[in-house]
Image (cartoon, helix red, strand yellow):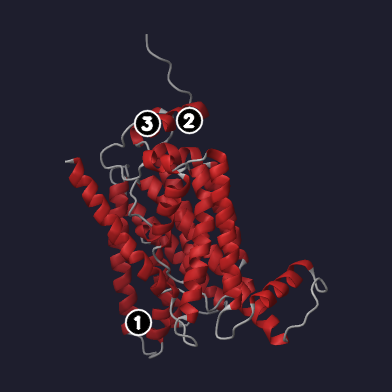
Amino acid sequence: MHAPAPKRDDPDSHEALLAVLQSAPPARGASLRPVASARAASGGSSGYALVILLMVGLLLGMAIAGLMFGSVHIPGGTAVAILANLVAGDGLVEPDWRAVYETIVVQTRMPRVVLAALVGASLGVTGMTIQSIVRNPLAGPSILGVSSGAATGAVVVMRWGLLGLGVFTLHISAFLGGLVTLFAVFWVARTGGHMTPTRLVLAGVAMSAILSALTSLIVLTSPDPQLASRVLFWTLGGFGTAQWKLIPIPLVALALGLGVMLVQARRLNLLMAGDESAVALGLNVQRFRQSMFVLAAALTGITVAVSGVIGFVGLIMPHIVRFLVGADHRRALPAVALLGASFTIGADLVARTVIAPLELPVGIVTALVGGPFFIWLLRRDARALGGAR
């Protein structure tokens, strides 16, 4: 007699498979290790709640620091009091601060902190999702070439001055550039009606190289001598142009994207077991992988549109979160959003204070942190493969 096949998308089957993953060695080539990650999530629900609480505290601390420090130092108590009056209404705290402090906090630093948090959270959840669907811990939001496509779209607008809608034209063109790049990558990677993660990654790398060369060509042939400096600063990322009117777009995108990813968390867990196991449990792997790639590309395009290209956030944060709370996406996705937000606020704080009153692009700070981390990952995986032999 044959055992009955598991029902399509049966939650009990999903849990059974995760239990097997935690007790069996990972398949050859599977770099995302559910065994070690699940072991790291010690303490069960109470341990997870403590980690989330600490991450929320870290985020609040980084946000307050972001309101305090800059070219003008504002005492922490004053920054908190201004924030309390803004949230709860005037009169909660007697205003004994200078009027310019309130203007700096409310109109300049707070939208910058909020935008940095939204971008960091979006890059974090996008990076975790991409690493799961391609089963590669060295993957990140830029792997699909979407970041390069968004940058090229924005550079085209800056080069030819197509700013009919003001600053929003730049954001729309960046988003459309990322979306067109995604479809191009899909077309290149899809051979014979089938698309593998390896071909998708290689297509993304090739498209990124082409678009980077195209961007450089546009800049070098421009008659505007200032274009190169503007493009350089924008392509390295930053939040210097943050305004309250820019917040709704990334906020809605993050809320919708994270909501969909949490709904699909069980299926993301299944992909870590390999395509064959996921198909055996009734998951349409090709369709699900493509839909998740589209979602990840949309989030990446929106973040690049409002902040420029900020690398390594989506690479570093998922690894730290898996070590802290495990590989289950139902737990890891909220955690990586919190940690990514804190990291990006901190990177922005360093960028605007380390050589104040001048400001560094945030992408430089994240690259200086993420580059060594990436090298460490490469060496760790090389040692693991050497030991397996």
Q: Residue furthest top?
A: 1
Please tell me how crowded label 2 is: few (under 14), some (14-19), or many (20+) other residues with Cα within 10 Å: some
Give coordinates of residue 229: x percent, y percent.
39, 85
**Quarter-of-image position of residue 30:** top left
The quadrant in which the C terminus is found is top left
Q: Is residue 189 above or below residue 65?
A: above
Query: Who comes first in sequence, dot 1 or dot 2?
Result: 2
Residue 274 visible in the displayed image: yes
- Dot placed on the residue nearer the N-terminal end, 1 or 3: 3
Q: CA distance from mark 1 to mark 2?
A: 52 Å
Residue that mark 2 sits on? 15
Tag 3: residue type?
Ser
Q: Residue drawn at (67%, 75%), measured in percent from left and top?
A: 79
Classify 10 Å Cα crowding around label 1: few (below 14), some (14-19), many (20 and above).
many
Which residue is the site of mark 1? 219
Say whether residue 33 is left or right of residue 49: left
Task: Say which element carries label 1.
Answer: helix
